Image: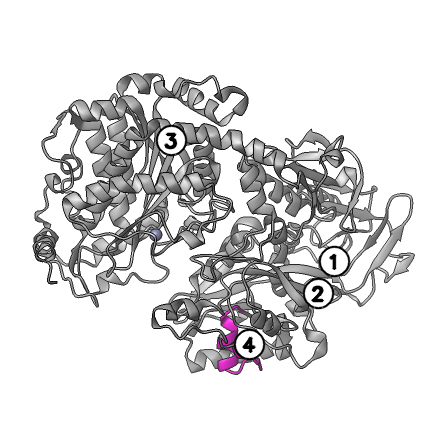
Amino acid sequence: MKNPLFIVIFCTFSLLGNSQVSIDYYLPENITYNTSIPAPKQFFGHEIGEWHLTHDKLYYYMLELAKVSERAIWEEYAKSYENRPLGHLIISSPENIKNIEQLRQQHLLLCDPSKSAGVDITDMPVFIKLGYGIHGNESSAQNASVLVAWYLTAGEGKEIDELLQNAVILIDPSLNPDGMQRHTTWVNSTRSLNNNSDPSSWEFSETWPGGRTNHYWFDLNRDYLLLQHPETVGRVAAFHKWKPNINTDHHETGANETFFFQPGIPSRNNPLTPAKNYELTAEIGKYHEKYLNAIGSFYYTEESFDDFYVGKGSSYPDIFGSVGILFEQAGVKGHLRETTRGLLSFPFAIRNHVTVSLSTLEAGLKMKEKLLGNQRDFYKDALNQADKYPVKGFIFTEPTDNGRVSEFIKILQKHQIKVYRTNRDLVRDGIQYKASESFIVPLKQSSHLFIRSLFEPVKIFTDSTFYDISTWVLPMSFNIRYSGINLAKEMEGLTGQEVTDPVREGKLVSPDNPYAFIFEWSEYFAPKALFALQDAGIITRVSAERFVFDNPDLKKEFSFGTIVVPVSGQPVSPDELQETMKKLAEDCGIVIYGVKTGLTPGGIDLGSNRIMPLDKPSVAMVVGAGANSGDAGEIWHMLDTRFKIPVTMITAQGFGSADLDRYNVIIITGSPDLNNPVMENIRAWNRRGGTLIGFENGNNWLQRNKFAEIEFVPSVTNKKDSGVYANRSMDNQVQQIPGSIFEARLDLSHPLCYGYTRDLLPVFKSTSSAAKKNGNIYNNPVVYTKDPLLSGYCTKENIERIRGTAVASVHENRVISIYDNTNFRAIWYGTNKIFLNAIFFGQVVR
Ligand SMILES: [Zn+2]
């Protein structure tokens, strides 16, 4: 605090924290405002920064601006899970707003190399998107959007007019409305009238799960590539609709930091992102420097955060010819807070975000032709690069699972990647690609770089530290087999019709008056069908053996895990059952077969004891303090949105009074604070036949509390530590596994592996912990192979350590350990089934 500037600034913080802030504090001096546009204080009844705006207030203000201002329109692009609208307040000059569709069409021509050469970029606006607060509890971001929107719609003068004539500005005021609503409710309801800046105050510690994430507790700033949530699906569609030249992403970081703006750490740039992009980012940074210097705010660049993972708000645009920029403001998470740098106020945090919003706009205006030119060049280069690149396309197939292939293709298409059926059979890498069952993604298309980032494994890295995961090979997460096609000649005649319709329709294939219905468990959505039947009280069974039908109606082998539904003895009539089966087949996109007889020519018959009766799973999961909200949210989301399976979420405290016999499955994530009597109840329930599932770190809890004997492999020490003090944090991270893909071998006959058709499976591992196999050799159905690394960062020592360890084991009394995250970010469709099998078939493991 030697710097006198610091002292002045910190005194100012303190005053502002006591709610004396005025709007002049945030915005440029000497601006007059159109009084017919309501200022924030007029609309909300308080100045920005005095309270945390809830999402509804923020949204209605944006609508009001769109209603009263000729410069603005509101365009909704999605609704959150909790039905809150997401959209852009689109701001430009009144004339541009009248011609907005024409301007958009003209702008998109820059992304089409066959037309872009003829476009005059000197005579068109630049498109800039300002995006605020994807982490719902980073409120200074969303609150800043209001001030920027008011400034642009109400501000008067030559400078603003010039900006609006030359720019179309899309304000996305709250990227995660549900999380924002949770956080703001918390922080407004726990504050005192007189600000209490004590960092231990309740105000600064939201209750579990906090407002960072969306309704199902997902970090939406990882979903741009994965597209598993409505907020992102809408947002990415809107990105491609507008293709803004600059996309800002306003966040908060730790309370003791200053302010970060990109460029990030150069050694951790994604190698596929064009170098030009980083140059433009640095040039735009000069404007932030100028603006932040003017208000005396401290900042840093290049030291932290990276754009390696291209599925974030600031990195996704980079691989589509736009420039994404991350901002991180020290977070107050309340109204006024003591930090190691002095008092930090909410208005101060908001002002920094307003300031860099305005510096971004000036950069956009001054760099307009450079940015538009960059966009045009990017798409032209994409096709040139495709011509030079040795791989010409990726072919893929997964004939036994319509669900996974369909969902995989849908994601590609949402990224504007074109997918085609294939015209002829092909064998590549020992894989049979039958024309009727295979698809191809040619690399010569505008998303060339993005396709490569989705399909190509990476094992060599220039840096051993990652802000996020180190790999995201999409076909691996779907367990879909694929190959690169290396010769242009081989592509000739291979590409058939573009996929526009559903890949395959579900159907019932049955003679009249069948004796039983059967369906295969290899289909991703088979669990949805099974649960719906069980929920309707229909008797269902699962086969522990293979069997064959061979008659004119049906020639087919059925594998382990096939579901068998007898027609007789059901609570519904045969006709009603047939109707239910037909509906379920269509709804789940699966094929259900009716058969005339129980006698099979190969394998067991349908009346065999090896076709075992199933109980409907009734699932409880521990949530609340101690549980892992990420793991729990992924489980809740999967069961609820994809399979319509209810999961009762109970806090550690709630378990004290819950009737455990209502459930036959209990899931433990993290380290919940269950007391001894509750643990004894769970133990007794487990002995009575309940399935207890430990998920990821939940297994440490199972081990500690003696629910299972688990031996973890000690971590490896780094042999190449530099011994240099300044490098210690980097050295510490060398042996981390930041999220990499490994190969596991399956025992296809084990109930945890029912539905898998190949005995090798890519598994995602985002923790360096590893567990030894269970002593019972029959109960380690999923084990890492000898040479397991498929893609991503992992040291030799760790590869050695992981080989042969368990991904999943079954212990005594139906305690099941799933050590790695089979449900990671809702994108690991390939390993979800191991988890679902634990829920459905834990009961039949002997
Ligand atoms: Zn954030």
Determine whether label 3 and label 1 are within 8 Å by CB.
no
Q: Nearer the viewer, mark 2 or mark 3?
A: 3
Check disc 1 and report the residue beneath it.
758
Determine whether label 2 and label 3 are within 8 Å by CB.
no
**Secondary element type, mark 3:** helix
Relative to 600, is 794 on the left or the right? left
Disc 4 to disc 1, C-alpha distance: 35 Å
Residue situated in front as seen by the camera: 324 or 211? 324
**Secondary element type, mark 4:** helix
Tell me which label, 3 or 1, sits earlier in the chain.
Answer: 3
Tell me which label, 2 or 3, sits earlier in the chain.
Answer: 3
Determine whether label 1 and label 2 are within 8 Å by CB.
yes
Check disc 2 and report the residue beneath it.
746
Quarter of the image for the N terminus: give it: bottom left
Q: Nearer the viewer, mark 4 or mark 2?
A: 2
Disc 2 to disc 3, C-alpha distance: 51 Å
Q: Is residue 57 visible?
A: no
403 vs 169: above or below: below
Q: Which secondary structure type mostly characterizes the magenta part of the structure?
A: loop
Q: Is residue 424 one of those drawn in magenta?
A: no
- Per the rendering, the mark at residue 371 is 3
Relative to 600, is 527 on the left or the right? left
Please provide the residue range marked out in magenta: 695-715
The three-letter amino acid code for the residue at tag 1 is: Arg
Check disc 4 and report the residue beneath it.
685
**Secondary element type, mark 2:** strand
The three-letter amino acid code for the residue at tag 4 is: Trp
The three-letter amino acid code for the residue at tag 2 is: Leu
Quarter of the image for the C terminus: give it: bottom right
Disc 1 to disc 2, C-alpha distance: 8 Å
Q: Which colour assignment does the render follow? A: one colour
